[in-house]
Amino acid sequence: MTTFATPEGTRRFAARFPKTAEGHFREAQRLAVSSLGIGTYLGNPDEKTDSGYTAAIVEAAQGGINVIDAAINYRFQRSERSIGAALAELENKGIARDELILCTKAGYLTPDGDMPSDPNEYFFREYIQPGVLGAKDIVGGGHCMTPRFLKNQLGRSLRNLRVDCVDVFYLHNPESQLGEVPKADFLERIREAFTFLESAVVAGEIQYYGVATWNAFRQEASARDSMQLAELVQIAQEIAGGRHRFRFVQLPFNLGMTEALTLGNQMVAGRKRTITEAADELDITLIASASLLQGQVARNLPGFVADAFGLENDAERALQFVRSAPGITTALVGMSRPEHARANARLLGMPTATVDQFSKLFARGETA
Ligand SMILES: NC(=O)c1ccc[n+]([C@@H]2O[C@H](COP(=O)([O-])OP(=O)(O)OC[C@H]3O[C@@H](n4cnc5c(N)ncnc54)[C@H](OP(=O)(O)O)[C@@H]3O)[C@@H](O)[C@H]2O)c1
């Protein structure tokens, strides 16, 4: 049985949804990828939220969404476990592993299920004592991306998710280390991490890897925690040549955070580029996070957004903006409630916004 997303499996998934609009499924890294994906960041570490996410993931996949996003630290590993439960349910309903693009992240130290009464004792026992971490590996009190730590986290994620292989394994907010670590040392850490990740590809435990960022690609190139995509690609190429699997970048993009389209903060072959242009030139797939700005742009949008996009409500308009943006493959939206998965599925039947609609929005000189 195939244990990862495949071109054939994801195309089979797409074929299940003949009523979705043209352009809902797009090709990225030879996979058929849905324009919306389900994220699992927000919510409490409790059973109600666990079952909410599991039901929402099943609902989302049955509605035509095949991108599922997590991180080991989301809700203290419970989100990954909710996904594992959803995958088992989906398998029973005939939707197989090779149809779904399963993504997770490592970088933040996290407890297991709930906050231990003595966190220091827990981390000492689980990480320091067995030699997974040395105190000097931890940056900012809780971030780490050494190969040994990543290997440990990947093992835990595979168990939580109940799979043999993760399709996209991201370094989680690596730029957070730039507050403490000089750029040259940081890039050396990235090189060591990428070397491990390429070995995990060879071992069949991940299919692709990437960086999931918050600030790195949304500010001026001179900012201390900004990153250059071309430098990361260069490192991956030096490790694994043209066949490297550094192929995904996640960054926030929504009506309130539009830098991916508007800020020329990247240099590629001596030319200034936006991150969407740079990613296109470097064969990197861009995934948008926080598509609803954590719910803030799901309501009360200014009237000109409705004038430009039509649709039924502001949540749809906000998601339409992200899924239609040139260069964005998937708009991740957090959904811990199946009602939201059902509501958002309506958008999948809608064609993406046209260039004219986009121009109309930007012609107002601002977004929400
Ligand atoms: N640095 C990083 O790597 C990073 C950072 C942030 C996010 N992410 C990823 O991106 C995903 C999405 O971001 P996010 O979850 O932070 O925020 P978001 O997608 O912008 O917003 C999620 C919120 O919107 C609500 N919602 C969903 N559909 C709605 C609808 N139709 N109407 C009204 N409200 C709706 C959700 O409610 P319910 O939960 O109640 O359904 C949830 O409270 C995350 O889950 C995560 O996977 C990555």
Image (cartoon, helix red, strand yellow):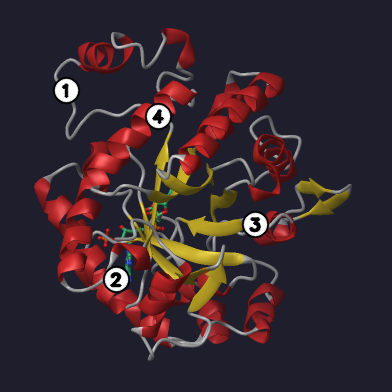
Which residue is found at the position 65% from the left and 40% from the top? 240
Residue lying at the far front of the rendered structure: 1
Q: What residue is pinned by disc 4?
A: 151
Question: Which is more N-terminal, label 2 or label 4?
Answer: 2
Q: Amino acid at mark 4?
A: Lys
Q: Nearer the viewer, mark 4 or mark 3?
A: 4
Q: Report helix, strand or loop for mark 3.
A: helix
Q: Is 156 displayed left or right of 368 in the figure?
A: left
Residue lying at the far left of the rendered structure: 47
Q: Is 94 displayed left or right of 208 in the figure?
A: left
Q: Report helix, strand or loop for mark 1.
A: loop
Question: Which is more N-terminal, label 1 or label 2?
Answer: 2
Q: Amino acid at mark 2?
A: Ala
Q: Quadrant of the N terminus?
A: bottom left
Q: Report helix, strand or loop for mark 2.
A: helix
Q: Is residue 247 above or below residue 32?
A: above
Q: CA distance from mark 4 to mark 3?
A: 31 Å
Q: Find residue 26 and report its horizontal and vertical position in percent.
A: 53, 74
Which residue is found at the position 45% from the left and 56% from the top? 290
Ligand 1 closer than 8 Å to the CB at disc 2?
no
